[in-house]
Amino acid sequence: MTTIGFSKVGLGLCVALAVSAPSTDADAKRRKTLKTLKKAPPSALRSANVEEAIAAATALGTSTSPQAMGELLDALAMGLHPRVASAALDAVALRAKQDSFDVVSFYMHHRSAKVRSSALKVMGALGDKRAKAMVLGGLGDGHKKVRAAAAEILAAKKEKKAIEPLMSLLKKGDEAPALALAALANPDLARAVSELIGTAPDGLLARCLGAILMRPDFKPEEARVEVVKALGKIPGNDSLEQLTNYVGAIPEKPPRDSRSEAERIIEARLGGI
Amino acid sequence: MATSHQITAGIRLLAALALVLASACGGTGSFGLSSGDNDSTKLAQAFATVQAPPAGPINSTGKPMVFLAARGKPKQLVAFDLESKKEVWRVEADISSKVVVGRDFVAHKEGDNTLVGRDITTGSQLWSVTLEGTFVGAAADSDRVYFTMKSGGRKWILRALSGKSGEEIWDAESNGALGAPAARGGLVFSPFMKQWLAILDAKAGTQLTRIRGIDQEISFVRTTPEHVYFGSKAGVFLLDERAASGKRAQSTYGNAKLPEHFIRVHYYWDAFDPVQAGYSAYDRNRVLWNASAKGDALAFSNDLVAVQTYRFFFGFSASTGELSWAYNHPRVDIVASAQLGTSIGMASMLGEIGALDPATGERIYEAKLAGQFIGGTFDAAGWAPNERTGKHSGTAAALVSIARDRDARFNDVKKFAVTALSQLKGGDVTRDLLVLIQNEKTPPYLLQTAADVLVSRKDPEGLAHLVEALSVRHNYVTGAKPRAVGVAARAIAALDPEGVNPRLRGQAVEGLIAHLTSPSTAVGDLVHLVRALGRIGAGAERSTLSSFLLVYRADPTFATQIDAVSATIDVLLSQGGTAEREIVAYVAEDKLSQPSVAEYAKRALVQRPTSPEAEGDKKGSKDGATAEAGKAKGAAKTKAPNAKP
């Protein structure tokens, strides 16, 4: 069980003590763990063969053994090839616990976007206040895939704090927030998104509003009509496609105002052509 | 026995031979080569005839004036009263030379071959004369205009005219080149063949004496109400009794020590260059100075000279060349400037009239004249405006504004401005340099210079600004982009940790760590961040550096770009304790470490067998320990780890 101990005092403590005075206690623990690790049996996860190590990480992720989690965190604490680190983090995310935080938090800033995305999944799985803040921070990441991963997690968690940065991203034309905002939208947010017509890219807005319409829980009907009307104001094929999708997805009966309005707009658009 | 006729004929023959010889040697009349040179008695006699000119402006109104040549078709000549800030008159005039100013008149060349005199109070034409040769230059005193022209193949004429009537008073001819004259107090000074300064009686045109430059050519002569100076690009002679020696060492002589970056040293307009007889680019690249005797040497007033280069003015210590002040005139070139003793007068292309304090470079006068101008002449000796606004931004701000100037003509000046910033004290300079470095529009050559200057300053007072630069973190949502992170880290790494404010040290460490661990930080900046942390971290950096090393030791990205990781190893070994050493040892031995990283770690461990902490030596001995250890282990055979802090 020394490996779990190492994960706490290895990289985890390094992070925790990043800006504080050096701790002789931490140094002592780290030293002890290093000695222990040197004596530990060889692990496939720490193989120099990257593919073998990835496979080992994936296998450890499916294991319910506490030792498996410890081995993953220890290996992450001591440093892995980025591809292996990503696989290890994906494995940790499957059964993440609070003691993962310290090790994983350093990987939130890893230079590989793929590694950061995997670390985000762990944070999303942890769900505590610190982890949530980290995921929110992911929306500001310089890489679009990391932002998209953060947006997806926040949308799944219905995180209201994400709305403002997601709206900012939408205005910037970022792909990440369209579906996330749709998932978070209530009538007020849908209206706020509609008001970005002319400001945010048409295609993004159309996808966002279209995704809102596709949510069966988005109510009331008046709000749906407003979203359809907003889509009707967006020029181009993207909005037409979203309206068409909506009409196709909603049964004719019982009749719904939003569907009728969508049909009217489609006819007007196509007739205009 | 010879008859009287024969004697007379013999004398005539000798005289004719003498004339031929003198002529062959380059001069006749007032400018013959056979005149007595460097005669101190004759020089003293010439000085005795001098009537001291007025201390202030020469014009009859006594008001400080500037006469500006306006661009256009036709061109115009504008008289401007500096005191009342009023245009006195404006007349159409095809000006083709500098304007010279007398008591009741101004004169200038007009068109190709006419010299014109104008009433100083109205600008109306008083007279005009046709030039029979190529105009070389002109001067005026209270009553007369003196001008030089080249007439024919080897003939130069210095002519005096009445300033009021244009009537010719005298001519002095030369077979050797004459330069543009100067006049003061009843004497006329004419550079002759770049070797002599002939001194003539202003009333009669007769040569009173002359100075021969023995170890320096004479290419200009300049008069002020107080003094007469002559010399060349090499330096300035004061025309006093000691000038009779003709040698620098025995004259009242001096020159200013000026940086060579961009300055073309012109102490005055070259009297032999016809281009400089008119308003030209030479008027925008000048050294502006006043000087007087101090002991046996020439001392520049307040040990300061000003250098104008187009829109920029720099005040330098004449003795050390150290920058004293800088002034950046906005947008347009200064086309006329003059050292007036108590101020530096200037006029811009767009008619902005100004004055600078020669001691500080502060702008002390502002006025505006309609039109666009090509040059001008100040008649404003002793003018001392004092319109201080209290907004003087200071030398550093002026240098920064020069460095940031978008005009592509001035790359050398900009580089100089940035380099000069390194000599200035105070944290604000660090801020200004950072602003320059952080500006996306700063060209690369300047960026590099600014970065090097910032690092070389080693100014602990600037740490607050470096911390501020590091406080910006990348955020795609807000659009925040940190800039100059690597440069700020280099500047911090260059600081003496002993002089660093402890509170700022903590903030700096926090900022450095944030950027070290940010994926947005350029790989090339990481090594500087690591070194800076090693320099000022005081232990707070160890945990982060340990993590950094462990996480990236196995990353192929760092297999070839090993600088940051190797610097981390160096810092951990030099600043850390046993725990850090064990981490490095682990990195050296573990198979997952990139081979280059492991190899570096191994060598570093050999060269640092024990850390300072383990030795009980907390600081200061790391380099020594490395060197000694290296020697002990024969490490000279291997490449030394990068041990720079």
Image (cartoon, helix red, strand yellow):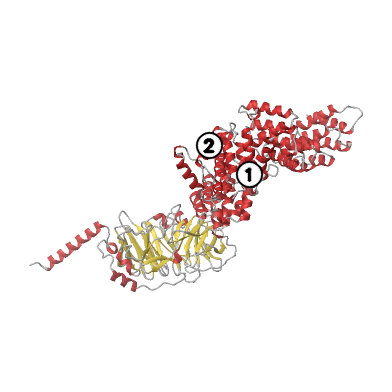
Q: Residue furthest left?
A: B1
Residue shown at the point (60%, 62%) measured from the top left: B391
Q: Is residue A186 left or right of residue B78?
A: right
Per the image, label 1 sits on a secondary structure element best described as helix
Image coordinates for residue A18, horizontal then vertical, percent = 65, 45
Nearer to us of marks 2 and 1 is: 1
Viewer-closest of B307 and A97:
A97
Q: Is residue B600 above or below residue B179?
A: above
> Label 1 is placed on what type of residue?
Asp
Q: Is residue A162 left or right of residue B39?
A: right
Name the disc covering residue A27, or none: 1
Q: Chain of mark 1?
A: A
Judge the density around disc 2: few (<14), some (14-19), many (≥20) Cα neighbours within 10 Å.
some
Viewer-closest of A260 and A63:
A63
Image coordinates for residue A199, horizontal then vertical, percent = 74, 41
Image coordinates for residue B261, horizontal then vertical, percent = 45, 52
Identify the residue under disc 2.
Answer: B602
